[in-house]
Amino acid sequence: MIRSVLPVGAALLGCASTVLAADQPTCSLTQKCPESAPCCSQYGQCGVGAYCLGGCDPRMSHTLDSCVPAPVCQSKKYPMTSLDGIVDVSKYLGDPKTADWVAQGEPLLFDGSVLLTMPAKSVGTVLASSTYMWYGSVKAKLKTSRDAGVVTAFILLSDVKDEIDYEFVGTELDIAQTNYYYQGIPSYVNSGNITGLSNTYDNFHEYEIQWTPDQITWLVDGKVGRTKKKSETFNATTNQYDYPQTPARVQLSIWPGGADTNAKGTVDWAGGKIDWNSAEIKNYGYYFATFGEIEVKCFDAKSPPGTNTGTSYTYNSAKGTNDTVIDGDKPTILKSFQGTGVDMDKGGNKASGTSSGSASDATPNTVPGGTSTGPGTNGPAAGNDNGSGSGGSSGGGGGGGSGTDSGPKCESTGFSQSCGGNGNSNGNSGKSDGQKLGGERILGASGLAAVVALAGMLLL
Ligand SMILES: *[C@@H]1O[C@H](CO)[C@@H](O)[C@H](O)[C@H]1NC(C)=O
Ligand SMILES: *[C@@H]1O[C@H](CO)[C@@H](O)[C@H](O)[C@H]1NC(C)=O
Ligand SMILES: *[C@@H]1O[C@H](CO)[C@@H](O)[C@H](O)[C@H]1NC(C)=O
Ligand SMILES: *[C@@H]1O[C@H](CO)[C@@H](O)[C@H](O)[C@H]1NC(C)=O
C-alpha cells in the first residue's frame, strides 16, 4: 500500500531546502514506472540502481524483470556486536556476501549492541536484511525506543508487500503490537496485542516470528503470544487467502509515527506528536532502539513454496502469490548504480557507488530515500487516515541519491537531517548516568557529505 508516500523532502520536517528531481516518477499498481526509470522502490518512486534492489516491487515496475532478482534465504545468526555487516544503501549493489544489512539512516554501535537512531527532526533509521526469507523463523533481541510518536519496528516485508509485523509504540512499553498484511492491502482488523511485557525500553526481550505456509506464530521470550492460521484468512470476495506468502526481507527500524507531516490517524496510533526537545534528545541527541542478536532460520521446504535451493527469487507473474515465485539461479549483483534487472552490467567500468552516470539528460535517481511514514503498512493508523495513505516505506534516511541540498538552517547529519534542532543531533555527545551513547558511527559526516554532493551532481 504505497500510496501518496511523502517524498524525501517532505519528511525533513520543516527543512525547506531539499531539492528533489521535481518530476521523479511515482509508481503504483495502476501506474508502472517508465522505461527510463523502470524500478519501483519500496517507497513508491521510480529509479535505477538501488531502486531495483531490495524492496523493488515487480508489480509496479516497468516490467516484471526490471527488479534485480532477490537473494535467497540463508540461515544465519547475526550477533549485532559490531557494525561490520551493515552497509549503507548508497554502497550496496546486491551481493549478500558483502552485507548482512542494508542501512538507511544512522546506525551506531553502543555497549556491544547496534543502536538505530533518530536524531531530532529526522526520519529515523532502518536496516533491511540483504537476503530474503520465504517462510521460516526470525528472532530479534531488542530494546524499544520510548516516548510519544516514536515507533520501533521489527517486520518482514516482501517486495509485493506481504508483511508480518511487530511494532512498538513509545508510550506503551508493556505491549508488542502484532499485525500482518497481504500485498499491502489495508485491513484494520488484523492487529493483535501481546501485553504484560516488562518495560520494553529497559529490558531486552526476544521477539520471534514463526512463519509457515499454514500459520504465523508470534512468540515473546519463547512464549506464544499470538497465532494466525492461513485458513482463517480466506477472502470470500476474491476467493483467495489474504495471507503473507512471498519472500520477505527482515526490517528493523525506528521511525517518527508522530511526525507533524503524518496523517492524524498515524500520529494518534503512535501515541501522539513527537517532542523533539525531549529528555532523550537532550541527553543523547537522538531517540534510539537497541538491537542484540538476530537469528534467521530458513523454511527449507523440499519443493516450492518455501525453498532456498537456488541463488535468487523472482516472480513470473504480477499476481505476486506463492505460486508465482521462482527459486532459481539468476544473479543478484549490479555492476553499478546505473544498472537495472534488464541490464545488470550497465556502467560496470565505473567505480561502484560513485558513478555519476553518463552525460545523458534526465539522469534517473539511483538510491531511494525513506520517509516518516514507517515501514510497511501501518494498519491501525491507516484505518484513520481515510485514504491519505500511511503507506509503506521505511522510516529510514531522507536523502541518498534522491538529492538533498542543505540550506542555511539545516545541518545535514547525513541521511537524517536536523533542521533548526538543538544542535546535539550528532549522537555522540549525549550523556546519561555517565554513559556515552554513540561512538562508532557507520558513516562519517564527510562520507555523507560526499553522497549528498554526488546526489546533487546526479540532478544536474
Ligand atoms: C493494542 O493496544 C493499543 C494501546 O493500548 C490499543 O490502542 C489498541 O486498540 C490495541 N489493539 C488491539 C487489537 O487490541
Ligand atoms: C477481500 O479482498 C478485497 C480486495 O483486495 C478487499 O478489499 C477486502 O477488504 C477483503 N476482505 C476482507 C474481509 O478482508
Ligand atoms: C499457494 O498459492 C495458491 C494460489 O494462490 C493457493 O491456492 C495455495 O493455497 C498456496 N499454497 C500455500 C502452501 O500457501
Ligand atoms: C478524512 O478524515 C478527516 C478527519 O477525520 C475528514 O475531515 C475528511 O473529510 C476525511 N476525508 C475523507 C476523504 O473521507
Image (cartoon, rainbow, N blue to C red):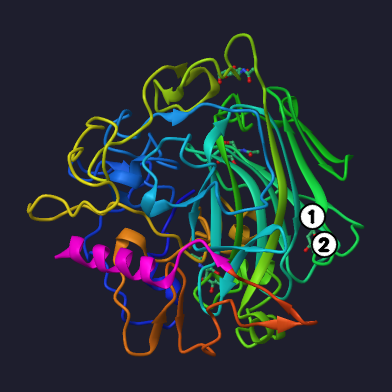
Give the main secondary structure, helix, strand or loop, of the magenta stretch. Answer: helix
Q: Nearer the viewer, residue 269 or 440?
A: 440
Residue 105: give x, y in percent of width and height. Answer: 49, 63
Nearest the camera: 318 or 140? 140
Q: Give the foreground label among 2 and 1.
A: 2
**Residue at 46% from the left image edge and 64% from the top image edge:** 443
Q: Does the magenta stretch include residue 263?
A: no
Residue 457 shown in magenta: yes
Q: In the figure, 300 relative to 27: above or below?
A: above
Q: Distance between the residues labelled 2 and 1?
A: 9 Å
Q: Position of residue 305 (x, y in %)?
A: 59, 17
Tell me the element at label 1: strand
What count of labels does the image hold? Answer: 2
Question: Percent from the top left, x then y, of residue 401?
Answer: 31, 59
As shown in the figure, which amino acid type bears the numbered disc 2? Thr
Q: Is residue 382 left or right of residue 419?
A: right
Please rate how many residues cluster around mark 2, counting C-alpha atoms within 10 Å: few if below 14, some from 14 to 19, many from 20: many
Residue 415 in picture, x, y percent from top left: 43, 67
Quarter of the image that includes the C terminus: bottom left
Task: Decide: is 102 above or below 315.
Answer: below
> Which is more N-terminal, label 1 or label 2?
1
Report which residue position mark 1 lands on.
Answer: 176
Q: What residue type is labelled 1?
A: Ala
Asked whether residue 32 is in view, the answer is no
- At horizontal 33% and vertical 48% (from top left) the residue drawn is 27
Q: Name the residue under label 2.
A: 200
In this rendering, would 224 be left or right of 243? right
Magenta span of residues: 440-460
Q: In this view, does 70 lie above or below 409?
A: above
Say which residue appears at 54% left-offset and 70% top-offset: 263
Comparing 202 with 186, the one in front is: 202
State the image quarter where residue 118 is shown: bottom right
